[in-house]
Image (cartoon, rainbow, N blue to C red):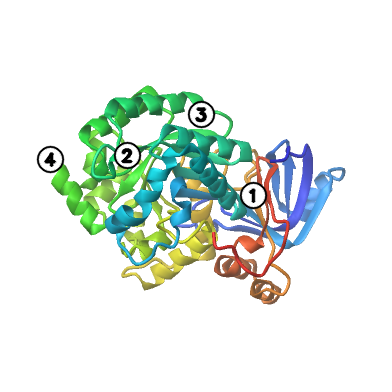
Amino acid sequence: MSEPDSGNILRAGVFHTPCNPFQESNALRSFEDGALLIEDGRVTACGDYAPIRAGHPHVPVRDLRGGFLVPGFIDTHLHFPQVRVLGGLGRQLLDWLEFVALPEEARMDDIAYARDTAQRFVSAMAAHGTTTALVFGAHFEAATAALFDTALDAGLRVACGMVLSDRRLRPELHQTAEAAYRASTNLIRRYHGKRRALYAVTPRFAVSASEAMLEVCRALILENPTVRFTSHLNENLTEIQEVARLFPWATDYLAVYERFNLAGRGAVMAHNVHPTDAELERMAARGTAAAHCPCSNGALGSGFFPMARHLAAGVPIAMGTDVGGGTGFGMLKEGLQAYTFQRLAPDGVHLTPAHLLYLATRAGAEALLLEDETGDFAAGKSADFVYLKPPPGSPLEGVIQHADSMERILAGIFTLAGAESVCEVQVEGAIVHRLEKRSLVPSVL
């Protein structure tokens, strides 16, 4: 990670969504010959190049024309131990967990292996333009610490927590309630609020967390009220049936978390493919966000995400890649798949490029209570951005050259861009990734 520049103007095409396009028709801001003025790692101004340059004639200019600046992507659901199990296709959720994901997660008890995994994971996030992420850590304290240390060294903004489970998984992934409380408390003290790190209390899901473990989660949040919370909700119909069997007192899946006060603002529930209307109403009332993971929903056969019902109820929606049940680290690809699945889903939502950019950026900041810090290019926010430029001779370059509007260019970026187009990534004005070698072959991660 480099040190931030004291001040400069970046000249390029610029896109951002400082407001919610599901609520406001003019949410997308785009500037064909645009500029970002960055001072001491913060955005000072964003807009057309000419007036910004005229107002700051002595500030150095980096001419990045031919490419485009977008806010850093914010991934609200992915699993750090699952890098090496990407591509485990052909199974549904519980079968995939047993035979693909959990054997790999058990290997995180080997700290050398966990550190290598953390390096691969963080490097892949940065290479795809993800600057902020809500991450499921490992079931082991040392491995989760390795992820925090690696992300801090790289300069990324990460909310993460040790994964808590005490039943229904492999025995080596279980903790006692006392051990879970002790290890989580240690990690909170070490990392929460340290530079760009935040802690997220993270029970894997209600199937693998007893009432005693969920009580630990409640205690951790009561004692540390600024931490975040994340878990899974309503991903798979068999999972939902199992939750009903294990918690016969609960009226629905969400009620399990609610009983332990785990479903308020700052809580992000992954998937929520099969919610009841009552659950959506209560999520909206509490400000609980859903992390929509379209690639994972398709790869694991979980179903179509009912976006229209979430929006009608007022539930906040962000987006996640769900590495490794998903198909990679690319938030641009998730946006494209969100668009595609909504085109096919019953009662699907017609998504525009503005919606896709919002879901990949500011929506995640709002879900994580970081909207005053990142997510768009409003003055005063952290200079978190991705510089996208298509490789010479690529299909994306051809689309851009023939596009008749900035919105058409943004649609082309979501359709065709991958890691090969991510030329530079900065967090708070410091470089966290720079593409050294251009290739027309996209990264598999």
SS assignment at label 3: helix
Q: Residue at image x 45%, y 57%?
A: 22
Q: In which quarter of the image is residue 132?
A: top right
Q: Mark 2 points at which residue?
A: 172
Q: Residue at image x 48%, y 47%?
A: 364
Q: Which of pointers 4 and 1 lies earlier in the amino acid sequence? A: 4
Out of 63 and 151, give the one closest to the viewer: 151
**What x and y, as percent, mark residue 330?**
53, 58
Q: Name the residue under label 4.
A: 249
Distance, label 3 to label 1, CA atoms, is: 24 Å
Residue depth check, mark 4 versus mark 3: number of the one nearer the observer: 3
Going by the numbered disc 4, the residue's amino acid type is Trp
Q: Name the residue under label 1.
A: 385
**What x and y, as percent, mark residue 218?**
30, 29
Distance, label 4 to label 3, CA atoms, is: 36 Å
Q: Which of pointers 4 and 3 lies earlier in the amino acid sequence? A: 3
The residue sitting at the right extreme is 58
Q: Do the residues labelled 4 and 1 touch (CB within 8 Å)?
A: no
Q: How crowded is the residue under tag 2: few (<14 C-alpha within 10 Å), some, or many (20+)?
A: some
Q: How crowded is the residue under tag 3: few (<14 C-alpha within 10 Å), some, or many (20+)?
A: many
